[in-house]
Amino acid sequence: MSGHKNGKSWSAAALKRRGWTNELIRELLPAPRYLIFDGHPVRLWSREDVRTAESSARFSERSAQLAAETSRTRAILEQSWSEAKKDKSSIWRLAGFYHSAILGQLTGASKGRAPQTSHAAAWLNEFFALEQRRVGQRLPEVMRNLLRAAPWLEQNPDHPLTTYLRGAYPRALFAAAHPGSRVFEGKTLTLGGTCRREGSVLAGDLSAILIHETTFWSGWFRAPRTQTALLADFDAKCERICRECAGERITAFAGVPSWNLALMRRVLEYTGRSNLLEVWPELSLFVHGGVEFAPYRRSFEGLLPSESMHYMETYNASEGFFAIADDPARDDMLLLLDYGTYYEFRADDRTVVPLEGVVAGGVYALLVTSSNGLWRYEIGDRVEFTSTDPYRIRFAGRTRQYINVFGEEVIVNNTDAALARACARTGAAVSEYTVAPLYMSLARRGAHEWVVEFDRRPADTARFAAELDAALRAENSDYDAKRSTTLDALRLTVVPSGTFLAWLRRRGKNKVPRLANDRVVAEQIAAAGGVADAAQAGTEACLAH
């Protein structure tokens, strides 16, 4: 298949990894054949044709020429970097990583057509502006544009902009590595799970295993102590974290949003402060993962009332490290293509496409083949592609978490988006929720029951339910259609604060199932909140008319 070394054909992406350019493809290869993936054509060339062309003198000559064409820009950047006065600080080390990454991408970038001078000037001036830290929020785009200017730099070694780059290059990278943030000057509070020895095997939560296996010097940058971080009893862990960390210089924290929210409330109770910035004034980053963050955002914004607070997501699963937020100005993640994982995507029950077959806006179940032994393993997650150049994704829920009892086909990103809209319109903040069906009877139509825990209650709960129902109808056309036929307005069951956390601890879970086609989880959580018997009565007062 395309992109596989042992397949019968190669795609354009596979050819470019072998050193081909668009010019060489047009000149040396026959017309491609096309396969349709998810309604979109993918170009493929025969492996035999490709290898025959690669053995030609023209291919060798042109490949050597392309390598030579990058030498001038590479020499400029390498000399500029080597002549800069650097120390051994973490800032210069990070700048060095940026420099290495730019050199690593330079050959591929220089194969393109040289841009017009006006375009190259705009991209270079954008890079130079890093010195004044005016574009730090768009750093990945600035770096990509510098690489896009590489062919122009090759052709204009004596231009004033090229001359200025020789001196500005290391200064701009230094500024990019230190854009006014002090997040690396303090410690990161990491809330992990638990792990245990089973014979010679270390088993448990991924977060706990990472903490356990990290080298001793990580303690210089991380809190709490390893023994505290790995405690199995959550109450005891929170108590010891409060004692150990309230006086530390905490500049970031990391973990699953639900458990961190519970911890941060305990910190405020322990310190008597009204928000976390009164405890840790330099706190500016939350690195989160494991669950969709949207339902928790308003609660965290209440705990951290600061415009300089950043929230960045990682997609680090037990099966592999798949994606990471690389730009604070975006709400999606960059898919990691060089971490030992080959990706495939299931668009429906039968259609599986390779990476080059996905389309922006498409939602797919994720399959992975990896160097740790997994083979076409479906991990149970759905992702939505927001871009294919580069490949960017959002988490779109679990494959098993959906509601389709009445043909409505509601998925997690529908409910998350609807909830965010309802909260914005009513001033509410929801800390947790789960949704289950209310089945049809002879006397009534079916409906969805939302079991909700508020962090900040709306002034009018009935209005909140109506806004939520309207937002879900706007998000999902199937739900909207069923609302006119087989479905009544949603019912809202409000449970007391702490109910979902109590359920998680009682069941030994780390994540709340958002959607289900049965009522098991919803009834368990309602019972944990003491509203099982009153669920119907309490719900009837909160119908979304």
Image (tube, rainbow, N blue to C red):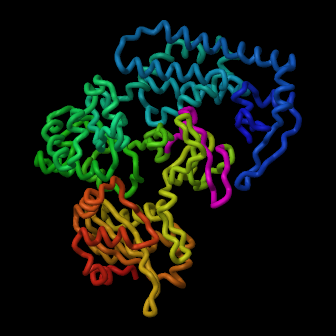
Give the answer, above or below, for where 393 lies relative to 486: above
Of residues 50 and 113, the one nearer the viewer is 50
**Magenta residue check for 344:** yes
Number of marks in the image? 0
Displayed quadrant of residue 227: top left
Numbered range of the magenta stretch: 333-355
Residue 104 coordinates in the image, percent (x, y): 58, 21
Which residue is rendered at x = 63% and y = 60% of the image?
A: 348
Note whether residue 386 is visible. no
Quadrant of the frame with the C terminus: bottom left
Residue 7 coordinates in the image, percent (x, y): 75, 37
**Magenta residue check for 529:** no
Quadrant of the frame with the N terminus: top right
Give the answer, above or below, for where 354 lies relative to 372: below
Of residues 166 and 320, the one nearer the viewer is 320
Left or right: 118 in relation to 274: right
Left or right: 520 in relation to 70: left
Which residue is rendered at x = 54% and y = 69% of the image?
A: 409
Give the answer, above or below, for where 210 lies relative to 354: above
